[in-house]
Amino acid sequence: MLKTSPFHPRTAPLVRAQTWRRWSGYQMASAYDPHPDREYAAIRSSAALIDVSPLYKYRIQGKDAVRLLDRTITRDMTKLKPGQVYYTPWCDAEGKVIDDGTVTNLGGGGYRLTSADSSFRWLHMNAVGLEVEIEDISERVGALSIQGPLSRAILSAATGADLSSLKYFRMIETRVRDTPVAVSRTGYTGDLGYEVWVDAARAVELWDALMEAGKPYGITPTGVWGMDIARIEAGLIMLDVDYFSSHHALIESRKSTPYEINLGWAVSPEKGPFNGHRALAAERKRGPAWGFVGLEVDWDSFERLFRARGLPPQIPNIAWRASAPVYRNGAQVGYATSGCWSPILKKSLALAHLRSPHFAPRTAVRLEVTVEHHRKLANAVVRKLPFYDPERKKA
Amino acid sequence: MSIQRYDAIIVGGGHNGLVAAAYLARAGRKTLVLERRPVIGGAAVTEEVFPGFKFSVFSYVVSLLRPEIIRDLDLPKHGLQILPLESTVTPLDNGDYLASWSDPDETRRELSRHSQRDADASSVFGRLMHHMAMAVKPILGMVPPDPASLSPGDLAGLLKLGGHFRSLGPERFHALHKLMTMSSADYLDEWFEFDPLKATKSASGIIGTFLGPRSPGSAYVLLHHHMGEIDGAFRAWGFQKGGTGAISDAIAAAAVAHGAEIRTGAAVERVLVRDGRTTGVALSSGEEIAAGTVVSGLDPRLTFTRLVETKELPSDLIEGVRRYKFRGSSGKVNLALSGLPKFTCMPGEGPHLRGAVSISPSIDYLERAYDDAKYGEFSRNPYMDIVIPSMIDPQMAPPGKHVMSIFVQYAPYHLNGGWTPQKRDAFGDAVVKTLARYAPNIESLILHRQVITPDDIERITGLSEGNIFQGELALQQLFFLRPVPEWAKYRTPIHGYWQCGAGTHPGGGIMGASGRLAALEIVGMQ
């Protein structure tokens, strides 16, 4: 039996086509409408309200909380100020990525770590000998992501707080009506947006208050399909889709270092010892064997493949998650792991792993596409991520 | 006399003029756009008519903006953002409704509520129209070949076209012939039985023309909708964030990024011609600007009889332009609302308020609306296409308030006794009264009302006789006949003087194809 999120009493009646999916053992909406066009549009035009409660969440405190986290993640924990949030991967001893998520300094010596996969055992393994409490608060904390250009106006109206001073990847504690919440300026869409963290027992109150405050601003309950398109445009990687956790990979070649999945920027070369630091230092010197990049499909070549079959170009209206080989000069140089039609860029996009040296921006490659049961190659060009990066995201 | 000299001057900053400017600048031409009004966009403008309320004053949805233009000019980077407009609801006189939703199965079920037969016919009809749209679509991207000509270019174009038609097969070719010749009512009669369905579908065949649903020739325009569906990925049909003015702004930004200059408040008085070739333009301020190429984005009447002296042109061309039909037939009512209308047929704030509401309860209703116009009156009970842009893009109105755009047909340019402020008000009243029959609370919501007649369209945008397509989209003035035979390839008899407006092939709607094809002809890239 799948679990339901604390917002389920409100979201369930809205899922018109019963388009549900599994997400970390929860029953979550793929979309509320039969297809995600309008929900995606809300992320880029007004505001989308997304239930992200299935994220794993841990509260970490105690004298050695910083030591534990610093030894676990690849970023420098000693620099994380109260009210600040890191996005970070964490690795095994070989420098292969286990998972990625956020770490928030809640102040008063408390920290919150979110992850895509369960991290309880790994945190405990790293906590041996440390004075630290690790509490799994996944089910006790509900989380709503409100994303889009009007998200700030809505949250300001709902909280009465001045959110214009809340900078990118910062967090404040405030109230929505009477409900205490934490608001972090984070998200998985690459747009202006916030995540609101609430005691699960009061989740429904929060939903109602945000929906009411958001109504004049076109707030739109949005499922995973809509968010998935936005995250690909934003070049944000997804565990189990774009990469395997080194804890789950059955074979060595399925593992990746942060450098190989475009997260090299989140590895601090200066910080003290942490899981994988030696391996990553060596890799920095050597250069990664793989790059994780964007591919932009050349529309004319794509259209030609379909026209040869008497068809207009056909693109799915949700993002695809499958492995598609990528070729250069007749040889396979990598594979794409997810992709979508970008409604805002009017381009067909993919996220891909390419072998060195084929991942330099503007490299011309060919992506395998299936056209009317036949495997064909469409021209594509390597792009730096993110594909879409509006100023308002950080402004 | 200015010492500035340009390679190309575009007269009129409408969307086609801007597209032409962008392509010319992209090809390295030093290009200047001159717009008479303080805002660019022509009929694709967003204006804050009442404080806090933004309106796509004239053109209000994106119809068929060409994907190649979106790509070539990288319009998304410059602000193109098309939001889905997913449904159409037709309120019926018996209190019921007919709806078309974004989900085909939902639509089918809704239709079968009214006619099981029509629900089944609908998908077969859709497939046939798809194939015909596939065959006809390439026409939108080609310079029209002249079938009376034997030049290699024309023959190549004709062969290409013939190839497309041959690929249709006999059954579909015959259907195409019917589409070209029949009235939309007759054509739809062959397929469907539920009258409101036929009425709502046929409405797309009469928009912007002085035809009724029973007038021969109106069937062809149905195809245009299906062409939009083929380009579905590009959201060829939808609502631009910020209104249609934001599309003009995006195209202008692309043009400027390629080096074009744009001047507003600069009315061109005359195109300067010496020895059969253009030398530039004179502004109404007296300023003269030199250029070897002048491209008119204005309609054929203004292009050939206002901007240049008719003595510069052959008399058969002048006669052709005189015969070219404008006769604007539509008006617009823009409302600022304090809240949302409640439709009797669909109470509550459902998804129907995010789509179009079509006042087209029956073919007879539309034909009677046309009857009024035929005899010089505006329709007492008009056809209306209603959208509430603030439901799709909340930033069009203050939070909680709304803007409503009502496209109205028929409002003949040639009204008995002419348009007066009183007649304009009476027209606005007729529109609101008609709407109130289906949404009784509408009158109590109206904060402000803007009524636009064809006379206003002409006065504000310059479009002759207020025709929104720069001349009727009727078969006798389409393709190699648009605007006049032998001058359908963007050229004019004056060397260096070109046309790029919707009065040329393929014309009409925010498509941009005329501007692009003209520019490509000018730089010789075709």
Image (spheres, rainbow, N blue to C red):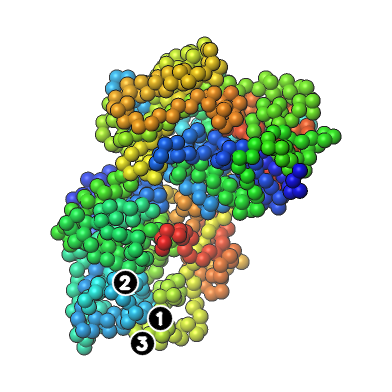
- Residue type at numbered disc 1: Ser
Residue beneath the point at 46% across and 86% down:
A282
Image quadrant for the C terminus of chain B? top right
Residue beneath the point at 28% across and 74% down:
A82
Residue beneath the point at 61% across and 33% down:
B502
Residue B4 circle label? none
CB-based contact (under 8 Å), mark 2 and mark 3: no
Query: Residues under labels 2 and 3: Cα distance?
Result: 20 Å
Residue B354, position as x, y percentages in the image: 36, 38
- Residue type at numbered disc 3: Gly
Discs 2 and 3 share one subunit? yes
- Would you call the spot at circle 3 few (<14 residues within 10 Å), some (14-19), or many (20 or more)? some
Which element type, helix, strand or loop, lies under badge 3?
Answer: loop
* First-in-chain label (2 vs 3): 2
Residue A272 circle label? 3
For discs 2 and 3, the disc positioned in front in the rendered view: 2
- The residue beneath circle 2 is A84
Quadrant of res A100: bottom left
- The residue beneath circle 1 is A268
Dot 3 falls on which chain?
A
Q: Is residue B131 above or below residue B474?
A: below
In the rendered view, does B139 fall on the left or right side of A356?
right
Query: Residues under labels 1 and 2: Cα distance?
Result: 17 Å
Residue toward you, B307 or B353: B307
Dot 1 falls on which chain?
A
CB-based contact (under 8 Å), mark 1 and mark 3: no
- Residue type at numbered disc 2: Gln
Which element type, helix, strand or loop, lies under badge 2?
Answer: loop
* First-in-chain label (1 vs 2): 2
Residue beneath the point at 31% across and 71% down:
A84
